[in-house]
Amino acid sequence: MADKDDDINIDKDTGKKDSPLRRLLGTIWNTRYTSDVKEDQELLVQRTFRELVIYVLFLIFVCIIAFGMSSTNMYYYTKVMMDLFLEVRSPEGISFRTISSVDDFWKFAKGPLLNSLYWEKWYNNEPLPASTFGYIYYENKLLGVPRLRQLRVSTNSCTVNEEFETFITDCYAMYSKDDEDTSDFGRAAQEPNETAWKYQSQDTLKGFMYWGKIHLYSGGGYIKDLHINKETSNQIINQLIDKLWIQRGARAVFISFTVYNANINLFCVITLLVEFPATGGAIPSWTFHTVKLIRYVTTFDMFILGCEVVFVIFVLYYIIEEIMEISFTGYRYFLDFWNILDVVLLFVAIVCITFNVYRSLTIMSKLQELLSNPLQYAPFENIGFWEVRFNNAVAITVFIAWVKVFKYISFNKTMTQLSTTLSRCAKDLLGFFIMFFIVFLAFTQLGFLLFGTQVNDFSTFMNSFFTLFRIILGDFDFHQLEQANRILGPIFFMLFVFFVFFVLINMFLAIINDTYSEVKSDMAKQTDQFIMSDYIRQGYQRIWSKLGGKKDNKMEGYEKILSGELSGKAVHFEDWKKELKKSGYNEEEIEEVFAKYDIDGDRVLDPVEQAKMLEELQKITAMMDASKQKEGAHAFDEVNEEDSDEEKAGHPGGGGDNVGMDDFMALTRRVDRMETTLKGMINNIDAVLVNLVNKIQR
């Protein structure tokens, strides 16, 4: 029975029997939330410091992984590709950016597009070897062949007004999934095997939805793949032009291809989109996704792989920690903002880990499929799109990880000013934001309805919304509003600036400033708590003492204040605190001593109180000397630890019930601090009562 009892301890926090497994988990995942440390500020700081050290290591690995995934080469690679495919002009002066009609599109396809895709000659017009065909800028390998894809809407997909039915017979609506044409068109009957005239679904093409400037488009459509040879591709485009591949009802034409640069191990997934709205004309847009799909090639990549393994271990560690905290605190866990941030961070991290594994497996299968048939189209749009989303998730992870640092440094008086200010003015801010958005949305709708048909910044409701935010920040074009409406434009602008900028924004700042002043005033009256710097300073002093270093004589701080320039004068607490910090005291010790001798509680030491302190300086010095002697005795006990253990083993009743010198000294210091704090509180209460009595008598 004795052995069994030795394996089971009583948890001092819960009062329940503690198993060895629970003790092990409590040792590894020992946080502020898994035990009650609110009453012991020093223990709270100790736990927080331990959590901070572990979290800083986690943050270092997160940053290494994030910055190891990106480089400036990505920007330059994207810029080179964009300049080539968007800026190069045809002999007629047409570039992709300037496309405004179907005719412009075909001029671009026959000129700048083919010239940019196929580099078959050197700059001196000498032909390249056939083995080097398929390279853009001589460095970027074109994977597979480019693809043209068209989306159409059905004939008579819209309704013609009765007045015009007699001379308007055909009607083609704006693009929508419901109105999308999936039937054969053009020369489908004469060329039954030609994919350009037959619709293929999104699943068949392994495509995905694409968000253009005007609409969200499906991944299906009518496709035509080009060739790896420039002359053959030119013939394909000429055939599409001659056979009227783009007709009425065409709403979008995509040009998709992927290039790979082995020098920097980067892919660039390019999509050029020309939308043909029901209004006529053409609107170009584009996406260039520069991504690193093959992750582990160089030695540095292998180092990043090792960091990712450590990152996974950290994530598992924090998952177990959060589960333990939830089991310990229950539903109260979700009432803390930082705990919710922890859950969000872990969720995003798990998503990133899952996608990283999926991407590595998918890219290998796609490359093997492409290498087996280099004349087919390489469908990298989907994985390129999700790779960009993955990079965005990593960026969010890094951002949240840095914000979470405040969780470990925001528990003392200085760091809590911001959080306390926001929490106190939350109700006022909520009421303000309701009023603000009522006014702001009213101006948003007014701007959209007044100027939406003429000014691009107000062409949609969302454009109008963000344009008004830009006006608040000083980014606006007044002349556009004036040109759109010479009367209502200036009136709209002046009313918005007056109500939103001069009234509402200043109300917001007033709420924050007033609350911050109140919080700062209240915190100035509070007693400084044991903070992280005190804990680090004490640890440093203990290490220095064990190494044989000498401690500074802190008593010189008292003598400097009471016998120096301030001798015979009233000593304010701020001056007291400033001088003693120079002597090495922490804020808690400074507050304790001051409160002990500030009898009237006015936060000022008058000459009488200073004289009493001087009388007791010798007593304090004697107490410090006695403490040093006890520490020396404790060191002697450690040297003779084996003899002491043998004596304990030989005497029943002498074992585990003895209290160590460290524990005894720690308890003694805590009792002294509690006694001093209580005396200070009593003195402050007495001073308040005296002031009240004096005011009543007056």
Image: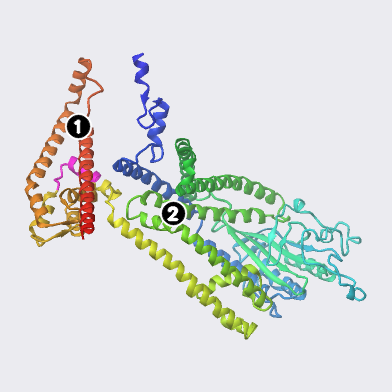
Residue 196 image offset from top left, x and y in percent:
82, 61
Whether residue 540 appears in magenta in the rendering, the answer is yes
Of the 4 image quadrants, the one containing the N terminus is top left
Residue 144 image offset from top left, x and y in percent:
69, 57
Residue 129 image offset from top left, x and y in percent:
66, 63
Q: Is residue 529 above or below residue 441?
A: above
Judge by depth and name the residue closer to the eye, 309 or 80: 309
The residue furthest top is 1
SS under mark 1: helix
- Kind of residue at badge 2: Val
Question: On the image, numbered disc 2 is attached to which residue?
Answer: 403
Q: What stretch is highlighted in magenta?
A: 538-551
Sequence-wise, the earlier of marks 1 and 2 is 2
Whether residue 337 appears in magenta in the rendering, the answer is no
Which disc, if any, is residue 661?
1
Q: Is residue 57 above or below residue 278?
A: above
SS under mark 2: helix
Sort mark 2 into few (<14), some (14-19) or many (20+) by Cα contacts within 10 Å. few
Can residue 242 be seen in this snapshot? yes
- Kind of residue at badge 1: Met
Task: Measure the alpha-carbon separation of dots 1 and 2.
Answer: 41 Å
**Left or right of residue 421, residue 549 in this image:** left
Judge by depth and name the residue closer to the eye, 139 or 312: 312
User: Which residue is rendered at x = 17% and y = 54% of the image?
Assistant: 580
